[in-house]
Amino acid sequence: MNDIGTSAVQSTWLLNVVNVVAILVFVVGSAAFTTWVERRMLGIWQDRYGPNRVGPFGVLQVLADMIKLLWKEDWVPSFADKFVFVVAPTIAMFVVVAAFAVVPVAPGIGVVDLNVGLLFFLAMTSLGVYAVMFGAYASDNKYALLGGLRAAAQMVSYEVFMGLSLMGVVMLTGTFNLREIVHAQEDGWFFIPQFIGMVIFFIAGIAESHRTPFDLPEAEHELTAGFHTEYSGMKFGMFFIGEYVSVLLTAAMMTVLFFGGWLGPTWGFLAYIPPVFWFLLKAGILVLLMILIRGSLPRPRYDQLMAFGWKAMLPLAMVNLLITAVVVLL
Amino acid sequence: MSIAVEATQEIPGILIELLSAFPDLQEQSCADAMPTVWATKSQIKNVLKKAKNLNYPLLYDITAIDERVRDKRVGQPESEFTVVYQLLSFGRNEFLRIKVALFDASLSIASVSDIYPNANWYERECADMFGIVFEGHPTPYPLMIPSTWKGHPLRKEHPARATEMEPFSLPDEIQDEEQEALRFDPHKWGMTRHGDNTDFMFLNLGPNHPSVHGVFRIALQLDGEEIVDAVPDIGYHHRGAEKMAERQAWHSYMPYTDRIDYLGGVMNNLPYCMAVEKLAGIKVNDRIKTIRIMLCEMFRIQSHFLFLGTFAQDVGQMSPIFYIFKDREFLFNIIETITGGRMHPSWFRIGGVAQDLPSGWDIKIREFLKMMPKNLKHYQSMIMKNRILKQRTVGVGVYNTEEAFEWGVTGGGLRATGFNWDIRKAMPYSGYENMDFEVPTATNGDCYDRAAVRFEEVWQSLRIIEQCLKNMPAGSYKADHPLTTPPRKDRTMMDIETLIHHFVHESWGPAIPAGECCTPIEATKGLNSYYIVSDGGTTSYRTRIRTPSFAHLQQIPSISRGMMVADLIAIIASIDFVMADVDR
Amino acid sequence: MILYLVLVVGLIIAMLAGPYFLGRRRVSRAVNEPYECGIVPVGSAQYRVPIPFYLFAIFFVIFDLEAVFLYAWSVAVKEVGWAGFIEALVFIVILLVALLYLWRMGALDWRTTRQKRDRARVQPR
């Protein structure tokens, strides 16, 4: 599959390896880093400290947590369906990290340039529901099962219009190729013409990574830990990292599709700043926004969440699609 | 030492009416002037039915007294175990105490849970603690004690200290047995395992669950997410506080009361102090009363703050609790300056408070009163105006005033149904009659309104504290009475009599005159009272602690059937209880 | 791309294998019980799940499959022009009508009867 189609990554094999390894390390590393950012930012917004002891500003807390997880007991419950139990977190982590392959970070930086990049992203994220379902069902735990049922219902519902919300962008550009979509935004970022699409995608993205206010599958106050109640140690850690990679993925895709990807100002000295900086800046702001949302909103009830999806988001996504089509055709 | 019983001027109307219907009822006069009658075992149901018709809609409490070793029972019928029913009438603004004598040989009485539904738990508790059988009880299973428990803790022959028993050990077999005994048996509670086309899931919510505010368990029968039925199970936090009262000196029991409603702090000391003071005939001055009110209202704010923070948190709003805790911390610092303690200062004393207010005590309070309005408005809009929170809580956990009566709900939960009744206004105590405040109410009686009422109560508490601040009377912090604790030191070294007196009081504590007394107060969560039976000794003969939380929990099944698990969490968050207050 | 996926799999295997070798193993009695707040559970967690949950699955199959057709139209919207737009419009309108039908039938209202009743009983806030 390497270098199928056109590619901005026309580099030597070695460069390619460096690129790939760098991105993988960066994705997993920044997911871990995001956990620290989140705890720290929530701390600041909530008038408290957050982790501030390990290393400068507590930044090494991430490392400490990782070491701790590595030394935790590798435990599979005796009552669980053992194979599925182990496979579930694997899927959770794999699909989101794999989906990152199509994210065009900057010219020359990115794992692969697929013609159907957008579809690949949608396909990978839609697989995420399996992780939750498998994990829940294999646990043979009632809280996990309730969490799993909620997750399945929520994720499949929000997936329907997640895809539709992106089709407006596809109409404007006529391609599924993410790099081409970024280039198409040189005259103006899509968050203006596709504002509704952006909002819907953002909401669906939060729902897909089941974070507050869409964290019903693991709603601590209701279902203890929801679908990962029986998970501990690194297998829990994989669900955890998966969630944060998913946050990054949503932010990265938002950046690519609606905020001009790596494109930055072209005047003055700002033009000399490497494009990757703009990408990271935009994605970072979006991640902070998601953390802020987590800090401020309560959690709706399951039926309210579903009704919101089916009665508001889905029709809105379809109408958005029609309006965009009219505009494109005119 | 004289037995100080306040003479009742006239016979209350309820007694006249009851006696005309049941001429053989025997009156008893108590120190608290609460109308009290003795009924016989066979007529208790009819008496209670009559009382209910005579405008006594709320069963306040049912408890029992093991009378077998009690000496001073002058004027009371022969009895080995006395079951005590307490009713409350809002229309008459009066309590009513009905007692029934039972004998060990036939320790049974008819259940009254068909007249007052909330008798259910009270009767189960009595059965656990005294071994009294309630005939016709729908669910006669242990409530407070594990089903494997041997004996009845509040009987006088049951040991009170660990040193009177075998050392505790928990071998694996016993642990398995205990765990097995806790397994929920749907059949026992009349539940089926299968519906028409689904299987029901039986889920234990608690005792180890983030949203049950302690160790509280609800066994749920679920159809998907919908709650078909629920069985609350309590007793995991039971410490035998009532038993401890029987072997602690009157004075040294004070710290135990703080830990009943552990968010209420000195608010718990108040009903205990007032009851003992009434028995001892101690009158406290206005300064003491005002200091007590001020501290109590501070703790009401503390408790409501925690309630409001966790209320928001339980429906998923993460941040408000942190903001609220900052102000709570400020208030704790004030309490610390005054009492030296924070959550459990145990600061009230029989006949006064522990120390006088420190100089400059008002500075921080002024600061607090100045900063609170702005902050409180901020929290109120942050929590109560949030649309998702409204969706989660409006129309959830609804009950009306009649249903609240049925389940013995008091406090904010009762006022949220639109019923304007606060015992601070209705039967003022400790100087509340001099305070200017309003009783906030709401209309819907749902989760949202219960929180809204508490926000308004915080405003009123701030008003009361401000009045205390402005009008703090001069005077002593301790009543001038021989039974005041700790005893007065000033004349100790003058002569041998006062020295002996001081020594005896200091070492054994005071001997409170025999009698019975109960002084309900509006605690943080509802009506709270200590029903104290003294036999004239240095310890209480029987102390019954009536707590609001106990009643509130019993109501959970009726308001959560047909709702979803998420609603149950909102309901639990909104009914304001702490498990220590439930189990005691 | 393949290299990337291989590396991802490698990383996951490393993460699984790490604790397998590093973590210590303990045997204790309570770990072999499913977590149910510290109480021995009644019945298994693998039971017949109520029907409403399957409704989602069915709606999902219907709507997501049809959404996929719209993906194809989106990428070619300029090529197929107004004719394609009309066809898509008809398609979307049918979908919306179906959604409206489900809505009216109450299939999208997952509230319980009591939730609806109690909500109607109180004044809005």
Image: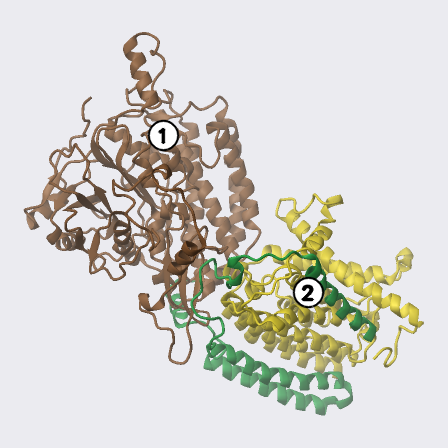
Chain colours: A yellow, B brown, C green
Q: Tell me the residue at 40%/51% (across/down).
A: B236
The answer to whether B35 is drawn above or below residue A267 in the figure is above
**Could you say which disc has been placed on residue B252 in the image?**
1
Determine whether, in the image, residue B467 is placed left or right of residue B544: right
For label 2, the residue is: A242
Residue density around tag 2, few if under 14, some if 14–19, many if 20 or more, within 10 Å: many
Check the picture and name the quadrant holding the N terminus of chain A.
bottom right
Q: What chain is tagged by disc 1?
A: B
Determine whether, in the image, residue B111 is placed left or right of residue B307: left
Q: Tell me the residue at 64%/48% (across/down).
A: A43
Q: How many marks?
A: 2
Picture coordinates of residue B190 (x, y %)? Answer: 31, 68
Q: Quadrant of residue B133?
A: bottom left
Q: What kind of element bears circle 1?
A: loop
Picture coordinates of residue B574 (x, y %)? Answer: 43, 54
The answer to whether C58 is drawn above or below residue B520 in the figure is below
Q: What kind of element bears circle 2?
A: helix
The one of A236 and A45 positioned closer to us in this rendering:
A236
Q: Nearer the viewer, mark 1 or mark 2?
A: 1
Labels 1 and 2 in the same subunit: no
Picture coordinates of residue B569 (x, y %)? Answer: 46, 59
Determine whether, in the image, residue A27 is placed left or right of residue B59: right
